[in-house]
Amino acid sequence: MKGMTRGSVPGKTFDTTKRTRTGKVSKAEEAQSLVTWKKGLFLIILAVIIVVASAVIITIGPMPITIPDVYCTLIDKFVPGVFSITQSMANVIWQIRMPRILGAVLVGFGLAICGCVMQAVLKNPLASPFTLGISSGAQFGVSLAAVFGITILGGPYFLIGNACLFALICSGVIIALSGMKGGTSETMILAGVAITYLFQAANQLFSYIANDEQRTIMSVWGMGSISGLNWHSILLLGAITVICVPLLFSKAWDLNLMTVGDESAKSMGVDSNRIRLFVMVVSSILVSVLVAFVGVIGFIGLVAPHIGRMILGSDHRFLIPAAGGIGAVLLLIADAISVNLFAPTVIPTGIIMSMIGVPFFLYLILRGRRKEYWS
């Protein structure tokens, strides 16, 4: 009797599990169920790590604060009068440390997921918002606003508007190349490298003719930092993330098929070009907004998906949330180091993230063929 294993496509379920003639679950199905259970357990553990790390990191800083102090302050914010909280402690926790913690989680989560799906649709392990030139385009927009005053938005968001616009322009170039006949993933990566060098040259030119104040703005933004985030920007980043991430996750099964090859995916009813365009547009919007608010933070979108593949394999139903969680943990750690390494001086988070990401990425290269667990 031919057996089948159980798999799923959004809206469809196929019974493809192998069972014995007596109707009992076979060893193949038991092994597959165990693998799925382990992957789910890893995601739960990763979520717990994010919560615990956030609770610990929020207590670290120039002002000594304990974990009970943090939770008493948070409870007092919603139910005033329950605990005796000093105003200075409430301001430090609620106005300074909480936005940094949530910002690190949102930005790390979003950039890592975008890197993961970009690597899948372009079928290139080097694809990421950083290597595709999106971050450099955003930095060019900031430089243009700082030096020449050319902006599309006014008020406190004049830098953010320019950064978002030029990041989207770079994304549009990559998307256009992906839709061209004969445009390979290598072509798009090389185009991203070319765009990066082009905008870096423009930024250096602007830096050369800028005054000290303008040069400081360009330099600080280009290093990448989440210290400028507040509750208004957190709400905006959270709204964009809540909209874009489920859209990307909805294509997880299609991404699994596309990693085998476009022809194989087409034979299974997946329009690779349409999926590639959809994923690139949605991820580019998310990256553009994140980068516009925090500046250039590299290596999260490159390293986090690789760590996820080493542990979970290439099933994007588990890899996408895993990459996001790993990215959140990495940026939380990087930001904690940036705040406390040379306190009271705060180092830009992007510098620490590069110091963490580069050695690990070199390790991946030197390691050669990676080992995938639970795949």
Image (cartoon, rainbow, N blue to C red):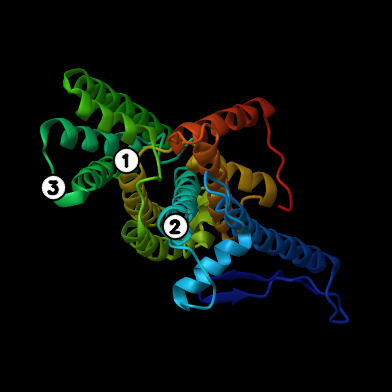
Q: Amino acid at mark 3?
A: Ile
Give the side of residue 77 with respect to residue 207, left or right.
right
Crowd class of label 1 (few under 14; some 14 to 19; many from 20; radius 10 Å): many
Instruction: Pick whichever of labels 3 and 1 is earlier in the sequence.
Output: 3
- How far is the residue under mark 3 from the one under mark 1? 23 Å
Under circle 1, the secondary element is helix
In front: label 1 or label 2: 2
Q: Name the foreground residue: 151 vs 94.
A: 94
Tell whether label 2 touches label 1 (CB within 8 Å). Answer: no
Under circle 2, the secondary element is helix
Q: Which residue is mark 3?
A: 152
In front: label 3 or label 1: 3
Q: Measured from the top left, where is residue 43 in percent x and y?
A: 65, 60
Q: Quadrant of residue 55?
A: bottom right
Q: Measured from the top left, where is residue 50 in percent x and y?
A: 60, 56
Quadrant occupied by the N terminus: bottom right
Circle number at residue 218: none
- How far is the residue under mark 1 from the one under mark 2? 48 Å
Crowd class of label 3 (few under 14; some 14 to 19; many from 20; radius 10 Å): some
Tell whether label 1 touches label 3 (CB within 8 Å). Answer: no
Numbered disc total = 3
Q: Amino acid at mark 2?
A: Ser
- How far is the residue under mark 2 from the one under mark 3? 38 Å
Q: Which residue is mark 1?
A: 174
Relative to 212, say whether 184 is above or below.
Answer: below
Q: Name the foreground residue: 23 vs 118.
A: 118
Residue located at (88% from left, 81% from top)? 22
Instruction: Pick whichever of labels 1 and 2 is earlier in the sequence.
Output: 2
Instruction: Pick whichever of labels 2 and 3 is earlier in the sequence.
Output: 2
Q: Which residue is mark 2?
A: 88
